[in-house]
Amino acid sequence: MKYSYFFVTGILWIIFLFPVKGQSTLQTEINALLEDDFFESSEVGISIYNLSTGESLYTYRDKKLTRPASVLKLLTATAALTYPEFEKPFRTELYYKGTLESDTLYGDLYVVGGFDPEFDEDSMQGLVEALQELPVTYITGTLYGDVSMKDSLYWGPGWSWDDTPYYFQPYLSPLMFHKGYVTVQVRPGEPGEQAALRFTPNSTFYSVENLTRTRNEAAGKFSLTRNWLENRNDIVVRGNVTAPVSSRINLYKSEDFFLCYFRERLLETGIDIRDTGYKEMVTDSVTAHIATWETPVRKVLAQMMKKSDNVAAEAVYFRLAALFKEEKRVGFEEGADAVKEFISSRLELDPENYRIADGSGISLYNYITPELLMECLKFAYADIHIFQELYKALPIAGIDGTLQNRMKTGKAYKNVHAKTGSVTGINSLAGFIRSVNNNDLAFVIINQNVRESKKARLFQDKICEILCNYAGSAP
């Protein structure tokens, strides 16, 4: 119980301030968590807001600039969802320019990239089958890739150069195929013999050297790499294999991978085309549309949020940039301008107080505050359409996505819909919670300078459990 003293005309008054049920307990419990030795060497910023009643429940260093990691995807997605045009499917289009006589195309083939992050082998087969239906078996000209949607910078500012060849840092292009990486499945053979390797997608675009040995400790630790310092795609698999392994590795560079694989599939089906190149397609009198492959925006958002897919996030970021600038060849700078405009016009905050470097949170140059992210969540909640799209895309505690193995018990189970974030030294969590009293809560937790990610995640999970048990006033 708190109390205050003050004097009125010589009389001492004592005013007892009785705590609001629920809110005082919430603050006390979170403050107790902050007493842990973990915070002697690390920092955290927290913002908690009751969306149902319109009151702030808790803040702690919420105006301090932090590196957000993948919770930045919440800002990217919400900004993009403010544009009605954003909800059109991601498209990859196939055209030819020339004349079609008998089974021969006298001219060129164009595949126009729309930065579809989910374009895979089935998608590619769809384009091949559309071409077969013309029908055509010989193309005299060139297979051109139109990558004019964005500029040629495939990595963002602040992206770590040594994160290649990891699959989560692809070489970005409007023509993405299989997210710019290949998957290798490794199975042990007879003791001392090579392991069996299977690559998907299988292509001549890369070479493979198998230096593995089965159940042979002298072979050393298992590893998968390529000569990435030379921007080459000579993949080397080496080391001791004792059990089946599945791993992924990115390829340099994505648009070349796309065109190589497309041409390979055409040749396999009896369609002969000899050369590939790059050229922007300009429609004229000899231009004919062949096919369009579409991927729904909801599928992309689900991958972006539930799987924390960086390719999906950057695809949304560049589409946002294109919508904002209303032009081609957009880049990371134009995407940042679009997000800053959203911060200024919709969140009514000064964008110069923050730094936006990319759409996924990979960049170590991103700096935002928990306060900014909270304003984003409040804005999304106030717009029923944006909230529905965002909410259904978020991971659910204990159920799916990056929260599948967290908060599998207690009140937090199924009641936390939130985006995770993790890069070296940073762990974050932000999203929505339904409390026991049917209050809708928004929360942002960004842990910095973390050496043990497990402790940061445990701290976040404990706060979520406290919030789920919050018994504040009914909405």
Image (cartoon, rainbow, N blue to C red):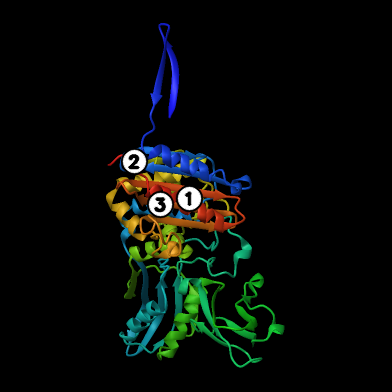
The Cα–Cα distance between marks 3 and 1, rounded to whole angstroms, is 22 Å
Q: Earlier in the sequence, mark 3 or mark 2?
A: 3
Q: Residue at x 63, y 80 (%)?
A: 236
Whether residue 104 is situated above or below residue 25 in the rendered picture: below
Residue holding disc 1: 336
Q: Nearer the viewer, residue 276 or 141?
A: 276
Instruction: Say left or right for 12 vs 237.
Output: left
Q: Earlier in the sequence, mark 3 or mark 1?
A: 1
Q: Quadrant of the N terminus?
A: top left
Q: Earlier in the sequence, mark 2 or mark 1?
A: 1
Q: Mark 3 against mark 1, which lies toward the viewer?
A: 3
Q: Mark 2 against mark 1, which lies toward the viewer?
A: 2
Tell me which amino acid carries mark 2: Gly
Proximity of marks 2 and 1: CB atoms separated by less than 8 Å: no
- Quarter where residue 84 is shown: bottom left
The Cα–Cα distance between marks 2 and 1, rounded to whole angstroms, is 38 Å
Q: Secondary structure at mark 1?
A: helix
For this orientation, the residue located farthest to the right is 218
Tell me which amino acid carries mark 3: Gly
Q: Residue at x 41, y 75 (%)?
A: 110
Q: Nearer the viewer, residue 338 or 1?
A: 1
Residue holding disc 3: 431
Within 10 Å of disc 3 (Cα), the crowding (few <14, some 14-19, many 20+) is: many
- Quarter where residue 304 is shown: bottom left
Q: Position of residue 411 (x, y in %)?
A: 37, 55
Q: Position of residue 424 (x, y in %)?
A: 59, 57
Q: Secondary structure at mark 2?
A: loop
Residue holding disc 2: 472
Instruction: Say left or right for 468 vs 427.
Output: left
Within 10 Å of disc 1 (Cα), the crowding (few <14, some 14-19, many 20+) is: many
